[in-house]
Image (tube, helix red, strand yellow):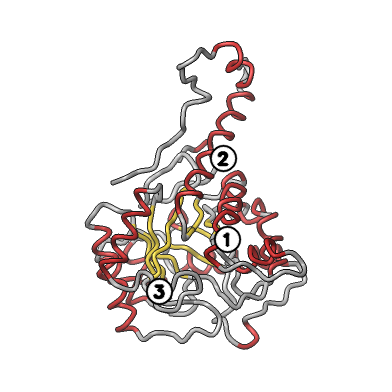
Amino acid sequence: MSNQSGRGHITGLPDWDRCAVMGVVNVTPDSFSDGGRWFDTTAAVKHGLEMVAQGADLVDVGGESTRPGATRVDEAEELRRVIPVVRGLASEGVVVSVDTMRASVAEQALAAGAALVNDVSGGLADPAMVPVVADAGAPFVVMHWRGFLEGGNVRGVYADVVTEVVDELHARVEAVLAGGIAADRIVVDPGLGFSKDAEHDLTLLAHLDRLRGLGHPLLVAASRKRFLGRVLAGPEGAPPPARERDAATAAVSALAAQAGAWAVRVHEVRATADAVRVARAVEGARTADSAPGATPAHQAYGTAHTPGACTPEARPVDTPSTGAHTSEGTR
C-alpha cells in the first residue's frame, strides 16, 4: 500500500498498493450466508488457504453469527470454534483477523497468531476488549454499532445517516484512543447492515469520502448483504439468495476501492480480487496521465505498443498470492 493511494498505514499489518481483500471464514452453523459449510476445523483452514490462493490478502475468522435474532454462543464454544482455525491458518503464513466481540477470544486468538481484531461492536460489547487489544499492541477494527440486532436495534432510525454514523464512529474512535490503542492501529467500518435499512447502506456507500474523513483506514463489509438483494430484485421482485449476490458484491468492492477503502470483506474472493486489481490499474493510469509532462496512457499505448509487448500501463498491477432492515445480519 503506497502513501499515494491515501488508504493509510496500519502498524502491525502488511502494506498493499491497492485495496486489500479480506476473505471470510465463518466457523458457525448459522451465519446468514454460509453457515455450516466451514464448521469443521479442517474444512475451515482449507477454505481459508483456498481464499488466499484466489487472491485474499488476509482472512477473517469468526465463530459467532451476528445476524438479527441469532443466539449468542458461550465463551467456551466460541473459543473451541475459532482458536484452532486461527492457529492453523497463521502457521501457514496467512495474515489472520479474528472476528469477535469477546476480549478473551481476541486475547487467545492473538496469542495463536492473529494479527488483527475485528470487533463489530467496536469494543462496546465487552469492556475488557479495548484494554486487551491495547496491551497486545494489535490493530483494531472499530465498527459503527448500535447494539445487538434484536428488538428495536434491528431497524435503525436516522435523520441523516451519514452524519450520524460519522459522528458516532468518531466518538467511538476517541474512546478507543483514550483506552490506549494507537491511532495508527485503528480501522473504521460503517457497519453496513447493522441497524440500517437498504437505503442507509447505499447512502453510506455513496459517501465513503465522509467516512475516510475520520482519518483512519476504512474497511467496507458489504458482501452478500440484504441491501444488495434489494437492489438486484427491484421494487417488486424477491431478493436472490445470499450466494447469488457475489457479482453485486464485486461491483461494490470495485466502487469501494475506487473511493479509497483500505480493504473489503467478502465471502467469495476471486471476483473481488479481480475487481480491486482493475480498480488499482485504473487508478495507476489516472495518476500517470496527471503527472507533469506525462504522455496520456491511452496515447502511449496506441503509439508505442507492439504485438507481444507488455507496456507499463498494460502490465498487471498485482497477482493473487498463493502462499436497510436486514434479517440476514452481516456475518
Direction from residue 48 to residue 72 in the image, left or right: right
Amino acid type, mark 1: Arg
Amino acid type, mark 3: Met
Kindly state the secondary structure of the residue where label 2 is placed.
helix
- CB atoms of marks 1 and 2 within 8 Å: no
Residue occupying image coordinates x 46% and y 75%: 31
Kindly state the secondary structure of the residue where label 1 is placed.
loop
179 lies above or below 46 = below
Q: Name the residue under label 1.
A: 245
In the foreground, 2 or 298: 298
Residue occupying image coordinates x 40% and y 38%: 319
- The label nearer to you, 1 versus 3, is 1
Residue 110 on image: x %, y %: 30, 65
Q: Residues within 10 Å of mark 2 (few under 14, many from 20)?
A: many
Direction from residue 163 to residue 212 in the image, left or right: left
220 lies above or below 128 = above
Residue 157 on image: x %, y %: 72, 77
Residue 299 on image: x %, y %: 64, 16
261 lies above or below 296 = below
- CA–CA distance in space, label 2 to label 3: 35 Å
321 lies above or below 153 = above
The total of numbered circles placed on residues is: 3
Q: Residue 223 appears in which quarter of the rendering?
A: bottom right
- The label nearer to you, 1 versus 2, is 1
First in residue order: circle 2 vs circle 3 = 3
Q: Mark 2 points at which residue?
A: 279
- CA–CA distance in space, label 1 to label 2: 20 Å
Q: Residue 51 appears in which quarter of the rendering?
A: bottom left
Amino acid type, mark 2: Ala
- CB atoms of marks 1 and 3 within 8 Å: no
First in residue order: circle 1 vs circle 2 = 1
Q: Specify the label residue 129 is tagged with.
A: 3
